[in-house]
Image (tube, rainbow, N blue to C red):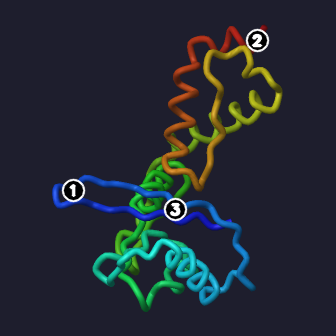
Amino acid sequence: YCGVALRYVTDDFQLFTFILGCFPYNAVSHSTQHLCEFVNKVLAEYNPVLGTTKFVVTGNEAKMLAAFREQCCRIGCADHYLNKQLQHPFHSEKIHSNRSTFEAVGCELAQTVFDHVKKIVFFVRHSHKQQKLPRKLQNYSETHFSGAIIMLDIFRGNLSKFTRSINQ
């Protein structure tokens, strides 16, 4: 399946999103050429007026970049960039400070706490003990924007009732 949406920003910066649909992907392959042809075919059914100043791809996936490189502008997806920044304190030992220099992240304590919380959440979810908690625990997802923050926040919200509920 391939989801296609159009977004429009007014002169006063109000965002409107129009979801055209989720269409069965029936192209020959997942190559950039076929992906581009498929999306253009879907768009042609709606006959939008798109120019290079209006047609912007926000996905970061290499296939998306290559498929639409010739016919539109491109800006990076803010969710992906923010998610990468949130991943550093929880996963990375070193980060690029510039193209050729690495610096230590220095977040060992945060990474240790994060790893312990992930293990507890995994255990509780798989042992079905979360039914005793007021709010369902959320597994960490690397692909979900701010997945680490969501997991930690829900865990923290359950913390006061956590020990009592789990030990029963």
Q: CA distance from mark 3 to mark 1?
A: 22 Å
Q: CA distance from mark 2 to mark 1?
A: 51 Å
Residue 22 location (% of width, % of height)? 62, 61
Q: Callout 2, which amino acid?
A: Asn
Report the residue at 59% width, 56% height from top.
Answer: 143
Report the quarter where the N terminus lies. Answer: bottom right
Q: Residue furthest right?
A: 127
Residue 130 as seen in the image, left or right of residue 44: right
Vertical position of residue 132 compared to residue 141: above or below:
above
Q: How many marks?
A: 3
Residue ID for mark 2: 167
> SS for tag 1?
loop
Report the residue at 69% width, 81% height from top.
Answer: 30
Residue ID for mark 1: 13
Residue 147 as seen in the image, left or right of residue 105: right
Q: Callout 3, which amino acid?
A: Leu
Residue ID for mark 3: 20
